[in-house]
């Protein structure tokens, strides 16, 4: 798997993660968290940003608790 950088901006702050493809699966990593999903017909870059958004929100809620 050859990882690529993915970035999103959420609440005015830029968050950076990495994603890699393995066949029809995408794996996104952010701050030690990792999620693997089936790609379907979504382009990899878009899927990576969507998954990274979920990981960032989970991380933010964990730190707020």
Image (cartoon, helix red, strand yellow):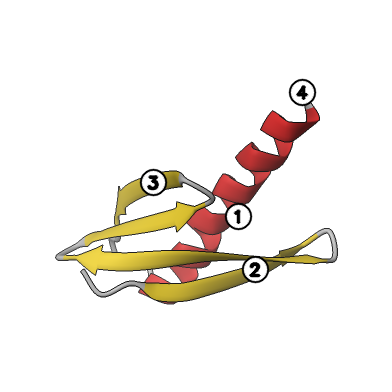
Residue corresponding to mark 4: 65
For image coordinates 51% across by 72% down, the residue present is 6
Number of numbered discs on residues: 4
Mark 4–mark 1 distance (CA, rounded to whole Å) = 19 Å
Residue corresponding to mark 3: 35
Location of residue 12 with respect to 53 vertically, above or below: below
Residue corresponding to mark 1: 53
Q: Quadrant location of the C terminus?
A: top right
Q: Earlier in the sequence, mark 3 or mark 2?
A: 2
Q: Earlier in the sequence, mark 1 or mark 2?
A: 2
Q: Give the x, y percent position of residue 50.
A: 53, 59
Q: Residues within 10 Å of mark 4 (few under 14, many from 20)?
A: few
Q: Earlier in the sequence, mark 4 or mark 2?
A: 2
Viewer-proximal residue, 53 or 29?
29
Q: Give the x, y percent position of residue 45.
A: 44, 75
Residue most extreme to the right: 12
Q: Give the x, y percent position of residue 43.
A: 38, 74
Residue most extreme to the front: 32
Residue corresponding to mark 2: 8
Q: Are marks 1 and 2 in contact (CB under 8 Å)?
A: yes
Q: Residues within 10 Å of mark 1 (few under 14, many from 20)?
A: some
Q: Are marks 4 and 2 in contact (CB under 8 Å)?
A: no
Mark 4–mark 2 distance (CA, rounded to whole Å) = 23 Å
Task: Tell me the SS state at disc 3.
Answer: strand
């Amino acid at each position: 798997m050859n990882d690529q950088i993915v970035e999103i901006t959420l609440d005015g702050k830029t968050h950076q993660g990495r994603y890699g493809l393995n066949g029809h699966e995408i794996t996104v990593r952010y701050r030690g968290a990792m999620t693997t999903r089936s790609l379907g017909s979504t382009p990899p870059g878009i899927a990576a940003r969507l998954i990274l958004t979920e990981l960032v929100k989970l991380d933010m809620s964990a730190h707020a608790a």
